[in-house]
Amino acid sequence: MNITDNWLVGFVDGEGCFFVGVNKNKTMKLKEQVIPEFRIVQHNRDIALLYEIKKFLKCGVVTYNRGKNNSSNVMEFRVRNLDDLSTIVVPFFRKNRLLTIKSISFNYFAEIIDLMKEKQHLTVTGLSKIKFLKGKMNI
Amino acid sequence: MNITDNWLVGFVDGEGCFFVGVNKNKTMKLKEQVIPEFRIVQHNRDIALLYEIKKFLKCGVVTYNRGKNNSSNVMEFRVRNLDDLSTIVVPFFRKNRLLTIKSISFNYFAEIIDLMKEKQHLTVTGLSKIKFLKGKMNI
């Protein structure tokens, strides 16, 4: 397999998802936890390709997808680690621009990652800003 | 927009479909018509990208997708013309290999296009062979 930057951009334009979850969490000072995630979901027949993508990006995990389908036939490559998102995923897609309108969601995602790197998700104003940006994603 | 060969391969690995329909048609000698099709389906918010793909490949049409959803929000880029499939689409994906297991369906598709170029879909044996190959696609 020969993954290239452009191939990955095309594949993510089709199959990738930039997502930010804001979950209730009593252990957090603000009682809410921000969980950003980049993922690519595939049928498990293409699990080898997901591992190739993990190797190519040098981060992330390949695991079962617990989405709507909740089937063991559906796998995902996923990056949740903030450092990996901040130093690998976001710079990659800033350099190699998506061609679909998914690029708009990516831009908000990248802005949220920047805020989180500055620990602004731990402040009332920062969390509020993140929720505002999140509301503009994937619509 | 800057479509490249590799981007298109990645996007088609995600969103493309190689399909062969065999429809009843009383006007055909064998009463069946073979309709091969390469398509990329997208929400109409990315219609500009479908037109860019059409321009890049120099063939095909952008039109409404009459799939399961049958919604006017869903568009497709589609190539059905046998000459275009034979001289543009098949050579492109033979040169630029898909990385998902969709490549297996593409190989059967390409074989069917080769048979059709030799007009074998108009013979009993050829049509039977095409149906056999079609049965191995997209499973």
Image: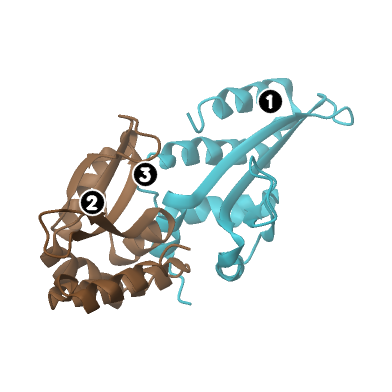
Chain colours: A cyan, B brown
Name the amino acid type tagged 2. Arg
Chain under numbered label 3: A
- At mark 2, the secondary structure is strand
**Rendered view: B116 above or below A95:** below
- Residue at horizontal 85 percent and vertical 26 percent from the top: A29
Q: How far apart are marks 2 and 3 (CA)?
A: 18 Å
**Mark sitting on residue A74:** none
**A74 or A126, nearer to the observer:** A74
Chain under numbered label 1: A
Name the amino acid type tagged 3. Thr
Residue corresponding to mark 1: A127
Q: Nearer the viewer, mark 2 or mark 3?
A: 2
**Mark sitting on residue B78:** 2
Among the 4 quarters of the image, the one containing residue A18: top right
Q: Which residue lies furthest to the right in this view?
A: A27
Mark 3 burial class by Cα count in 10 Å: few <14, some 14-19, many 20+:
many
**Rendered view: B39 above or below B105:** above
**A112 or B131, nearer to the observer:** B131
- Residue at horizontal 35 percent and vertical 67 percent from the top: B134
Give the percent coordinates (x, y) of residue B46: 32, 39
**B12 or A21, nearer to the observer:** B12
Give the percent coordinates (x, y) of residue B126: 22, 77
The reply to whether dot 1 and dot 2 touch (C-beta < 8 Å) is: no
Name the amino acid type tagged 1. Leu
Left or right of A128? Residue B108 is left
